Image: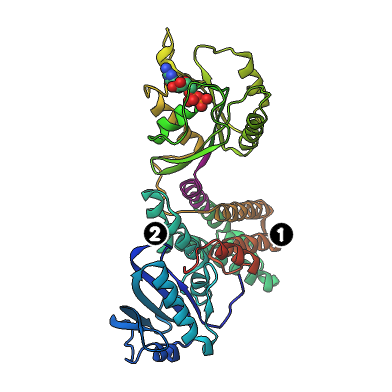
Amino acid sequence: MVAYAHEPIVAIATAPGQGGIGVVRVSGKNLLPLTQTLFSTPLKARHAHYLDFNDANGTPIDKGIVLFFPAPHSYTGEDVLELQGHGGPAVLRRLLERCLEAGAHLGLRHAEPGEFTHRAFLNDRIDLAQAEAVADLIEASSEAAARSAMASLSGAFSHQVNALDERIVHLRMLVEATLDFPEEEIEFLEKYQAHEQLVSIQNDLNEILQQAGQGMILREGLHVVLAGQPNVGKSSLLNALAGDDIAIVTPVAGTTRDKVVQQIHINGVPIHIIDTAGLRDTDDTVERIGIERTWAEIEKANVIIHLQDIRSPEDPLDSDITERLPARTPVLNVFNKLDLATEKPTSTDSRLYISAKSGDGLNELRQRLLDIAGWKPTSESPWLARERHVNALKSAAGHLELAAQHAQFNDSVLDLFAEELRLAHEDLCAITGQFTSDDLLGEIFSSFCIGK
Ligand code: GDP
């Protein structure tokens, strides 16, 4: 991703493939000359014109709606031209080429991924958290995630962060004013009730952090690996949770040789379930590679479901698997084929009994997965959050905690108190993008799709 470039950009803004409508979008400082080359009619601002889209010789390529949004009242804050034609790949490519040709003298070029939104950010149309919400809204895989992304896009998250930041800045201003006039440095912290202000800011930050944690779960989901010996029912469980047949289920051991990933939703939370090759000793080279990959997946998992056959609960091979599982990752010990068991034990905290075949115990398994994710159905998740936001909020909380420690020494270390407030302020600003490195911006915007 380049830093702000001034030349106009163009891209097909709709998804590749066929559709009723396809949109080509152009953004630039001054697109008037381009509109004049493309159309003989002058374009009224924000007015739908139904016009021919002609090639350089005047032969129609398509006919459709043209919208012109003069700066600054547009998505990017620059002039924006939208051509809405028929949604076919060939016709849209021709329209794109026509724009590039007609705008060549202006330096018009293909847009890079996320470049329209990057410009919107650089022109202060939206802040960084809102720009990220644009991508999150497009990528949202559940209705809950889409709703929360929209709330972030409308500024709900940024607003809370900014309101908190203003209080930190205000407190810091009071401290710095005191530091500038040392002769008046009399019991500053007491006079301005700084302790109380700080505690209240810390409480509110913790509240935002808690909500951001929920928002992050909603965005990132949970990576769950199904591990266990061959034939215990891993693929059957995946299918039962997913509700359709995506993994091959056979009574022959060692069928799943590579991983199968399926995304399901539990109460709107995305759960990425990874079915893996059954873990056993084998001479089959292909199967062995599958097993090595299983262990690699296990290392990356947020949660491991160690699936076992209820009819052989103390299998030494399962003890071997248990021993190899990483200690840092939560493991659910799940015993399958409850329908075949002569006795029907009830699940405990450490053991869950299910039948992938009959569906018994699956709701409890779903609930356990949500519990492990930290999902609290009662707590609201008004906006989506990314790991970056949660880390910045945690860092700000750390600085406020240090400020609180300095405050215990009353006014003797006011400068250190002020410094921690400054650092907390910088962390919050990083969320909305007031202090952000070009590298980070590049990383964020390059993950967008082209045309956005
Ligand atoms: P994997 O190798 O661990 O993926 O096991 P599969 O899902 O391929 O299942 C192995 C065999 O066990 C198949 O014949 C399944 O139909 C059967 N199976 C799986 N789960 C259950 C269950 O809950 N009850 C019963 N009776 N059979 C099951």
Q: Secondary structure at mark 1?
A: helix
Coordinates of residue 377 in the picture (x, y in percent): 39, 40
Task: Tell me which secondary structure the magenta stretch mostly adopts.
Answer: helix
Whichever of callouts 1 and 2 sits on the residue coming sooner in the sequence is 2
**Above or below, comparing residue 187 to residue 36 in the picture:** above
The residue under label 1 is: 413
Label 2 beta carbon less than 8 Å to ligand 1:
no
Q: Secondary structure at mark 2?
A: helix
The residue under label 2 is: 150
Coordinates of residue 307 in the picture (x, y in percent): 53, 24
Task: From the viewer's perspective, tell me whether residue 259 is left or right of residue 136.
Answer: right
How would you rate the neighbour count of disc 1 (Cα within 10 Å): few for under 14, some for 14-19, many for 20 or more? few
Is 247 a magenta residue? Answer: no
Res 352 visible: no
Label 1 beta carbon less than 8 Å to ligand 1:
no
Which residue is the extreme one toward the top?
342
Task: From the viewer's perspective, tell me whether residue 43 is left or right of residue 226.
Answer: left
